[in-house]
Image: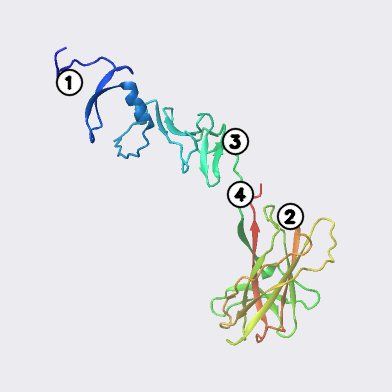
Amino acid sequence: MADVKISALGAIASVAGEDLVAIIDDPSGTPASRKATITQIATFLASDSTTRTADLDMGNLNIDDINSLYLSEKAAANADITGDGQIWVKNESPNVLYFTDDAGTDFQVATEAGTETLTNKTIDGDNNTISNLAIGAEVGTTLTETQEIWIPAGAFTSATTNGASITSRETSSNVVNYTYAAFDTSTSEIAWFTWTPPANWNAGTVRFKLYWTNTAGLTTETIDFDLAAVAFADDDALDTAVGSAANVTDTWIAQNDLHITAYSSAITIAGSPAAGEEVHFKLSRDVASDNMTGDVDVIGVLLEYTVDDIGTT
C-alpha cells in the first residue's frame, strides 16, 4: 500500500476494540512510531488516577427535556453519600429529587453520624406532609420551651394566720384601679394561690417574678419575698409541707410606681408533682432581710414553667 496521509484516509463507520490507531511511543525520549488498539487505550484511561477539573456550563437545563439526570459520586473517604450513591432527578409530575444508595433501592440523607436510611418514605398529596418518617437517634423528639402564666393579686387567698390584706385602690389623677396584696413591714405575712399545670408541663422546676408597688419607701431600701410550693394528686392529704422556697429582691424606685423584679432561682415543688395536679404556692415577705418602709403592695406574680411539647395532645 502506498504511503497515504492519515487525513486522506476514509472515515470508519464505527469503532471496535481491535481497531488500530497510530501512536508515538516515548515522545520525550526516543520517539518511535507504533500502533495501539482501541482496547489498549480504553484500559489506560480506566486506570489513570490523574485528577482533572473542568467547568461544566449546563445553561438553562430543562429537566422536562430528559428522563433522568444522574449525578453519581465517586467513592471516597469524604464522600457525602457512601459508595456509588446517586443524586438524581426523575422526570415525573411533579419532578422529584431522589437520594439513593449504591443499590439504588433505599433513600438516604446525610447526617453527622453518617447516613440515615429512609426506606419507603413518602411526601403526601399536599406536598407538605412527610409520612412514615422515623427520626434518627441524633435528633430529639422533645421540643422543650418555657411558658408563663400571670397570677394577679385578685386570685390570691389571704392566709388565715398572718395573712396579707387583699384589697384594691385607684390612682389620684387617672383613677387607674388595681388589686393588690399588702404585706406588712414588721410581720412576715402570707398569701396563697393555686395553679393547675397543663398536660404538656414537664413537672420540672418553676421561677417567678414579683410585680409590686409602695407608698412610703426610700431609694436605699429593698424588698425580699419567698415563694414555695407543694403539689397534690387525687387523694393526697392537703396537710402537706411546701418545698424549699426561692426568693426575689428588688430596690425601691418611686412611690406608686410599678416595680418588677428579676426572675428567682428555680423552685422545686414538693409532693412529686405531675401535669394536671393542683399546685399550691405560698408567697411570704421575709421581714428579717426586707427593710422596706411600710407595706409592700404585691400586684401579681409571673410564673414561668417548662413544657416538653407544643400543645397538649
User: Where is the N terminus found, in terms of image quarters?
Assistant: top left
Look at 76% across and 76% down and name the residue there: 163
Q: Secondary structure at mark 4?
A: loop
Query: Which class describes the residues within 10 Å of circle 2: few (<14), some (14-19), or many (20+)?
Result: some
Residue 140 is labelled as 4
Look at 46% across and 37% down and name the residue there: 75
Task: State the image coordinates of residue 266 (x, y, percent, origin top left).
Answer: 67, 67
Give the camera-side residue of 214 and 33. Answer: 33
First in sequence: mark 2 vs mark 3 = 3
Residue type at mark 4? Gly
Task: State the image coordinates of residue 62 (x, y, percent, origin top left).
Answer: 34, 31
Circle 2 is placed at which residue position?
276
Q: Is residue 53 above or below residue 247?
A: above
Circle 3 is placed at which residue position?
132
Q: Is residue 38 visible?
A: yes
Q: Secondary structure at mark 3?
A: loop
First in sequence: mark 3 vs mark 1 = 1
For marks 3 and 4, give the one nearer the viewer.
4
Task: State the image coordinates of residue 285 (x, y, percent, origin top left).
Answer: 71, 78
The CA span between labels 2 and 4 is: 25 Å
Query: Which class describes the residues within 10 Å of circle 4: few (<14), some (14-19), or many (20+)?
Result: few
**Rendered image quadrant of residue 236:** bottom right
Residue type at mark 3? Asn
Circle 1 is placed at which residue position?
6
